[in-house]
Amino acid sequence: MMAKLLTPEVFMIVKVVLVFFVVLTMVAVGTWVERRGAAFIQDRVGPNRVALFGKFRIMGLTQPVADGIKFFFKEDVIPKNVDRVLFVLSPIIAFIPATMTFAAIPFGRPFEFNGVHYFLSILPPATNIGVLYIFAIGSMGVYGIIVGAWASNNKWSILGGMRASAQVISYELAMTMAVVGVVLSTGSLRLDKVISAQTGLWNIVPQFLGALVFFVAMFAETNRLPFDFAEGESEIIGYHVEYGSMKFSMFALAEYANMITASALFVTLYLGGWHFPWLDQFIWGSILVFLLKIAFILWIFVWVRWTLPRFRYDQLMRLGWKVMIPLSLLNMVVVAVFLAYRG
């Protein structure tokens, strides 16, 4: 009976629903962790009042539910003189790539059941485009920013959108070139091959320089402090100043989804993916290891946000073009020379 139910088509649907549900759940939990983590670091309480049906007031765990209800019922105001079609589409354009990029990432060890081989990623790992797919789809998210800024017909939104676009494009170069070192050492663009190559030693050790560049670029790519110039709350406000209600929440959801995807990609490329001694021998253990590694990186996002001040924009661009890109090039050359010498 189980063999008849677990067909490849049914398993694909289950994976899509499961990944989408887990990502959205992690987004909701991430907003709670962000606020509780800020309170912990700043020695204050944080959300603790919201209670479901007057009960379950444990550390404000129902705060994400209250936030979701609030966004659903807030008045949806569209200002005059905006491009209504693009104004409505831009949050969707920002949100969809943030969730689609997770499709190529293996989140657990493959297994065989009743003679059929099953893999735990939405895209089949046999397609040799895993890394290219992630960067191609992920780079589309910048259109949500610039389209939303342009459609708002607000000079401050346009300024915020332009500098956010320049920031994302600049750090994409460093991030992509940092990953070239992993691709060279693995000899494949397939992420399952990248994970298999880290069975004994994770890439963060031999390719620490590339991992460092990728890690710093993650903060700029996801618009997180100390590089949150896309929002810029203390100055020009940013590209989404005219947005409210669910449209604004979709921009926030896209940011957290991007953080989850970037963390999952860092874990896959440099922290061994779902590998961990003993636990990765089991399907549930490999999935649990992968999720715990992602949670660790996400906590670092929160930790850094409430520890470091925001850079100046000229410092951000100087760091990207004069430090990160040269370091990524150096890492690529070192890896290539080492592989040529070893071969």
Image: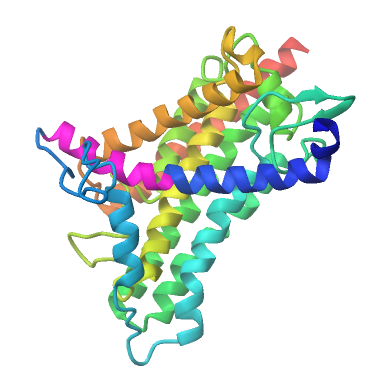
Q: What is the count of numbered marks?
A: 0
Q: Is residue 316 above or below residue 183?
A: below
Q: Is residue 33 within the magenta segment?
A: yes
Residue 4 in the figure: left or right of residue 156: right
State the residue in front, 185 or 231: 231
Identity of the residue drawn at 41% across and 36% down: 216
Pick the front one: 162 or 123: 123
Q: Which residue is rendered at x = 40% and y = 74% of the image?
A: 149
Residue at the image point whose x is 43% and y is 59% from the top: 166
Residue 308 visible in the displayed image: no
Q: Is 326 located above or below residue 140 in the figure?
A: above
Magenta span of residues: 27-42
Q: For residue 193, which quarter of the picture?
A: top right
For the stretch drawn in magenta, what is the main secondary structure? helix
Q: Residue at x 16, y 38 (%)?
A: 39
Residue 169 in the image, given as x and y percentages of width and height? 50, 55
Residue 319 painted magenta: no
The part of the image, by quadrant, that contains residue 183 is top right
Q: Residue furthest left?
A: 44
Q: Is residue 343 above or below residue 8?
A: above
Viewer-side residue, 71 vs 267:
71
Residue that lies at the very extreme toward the bottom in this rendered image: 81
Spot occupied by residue 265 in the image (x, y as percentages of width and height): 56, 36
Q: In which quarter of the image is residue 11?
A: top right
Residue 153 in sight: yes
The x and y percentages for residue 241 are: 29, 71
Q: Does residue 338 sit above or below 258 in this rendering?
A: above
Q: Quadrant of the C terminus?
A: top right
Residue 55 position in % (x across, y down): 22, 44
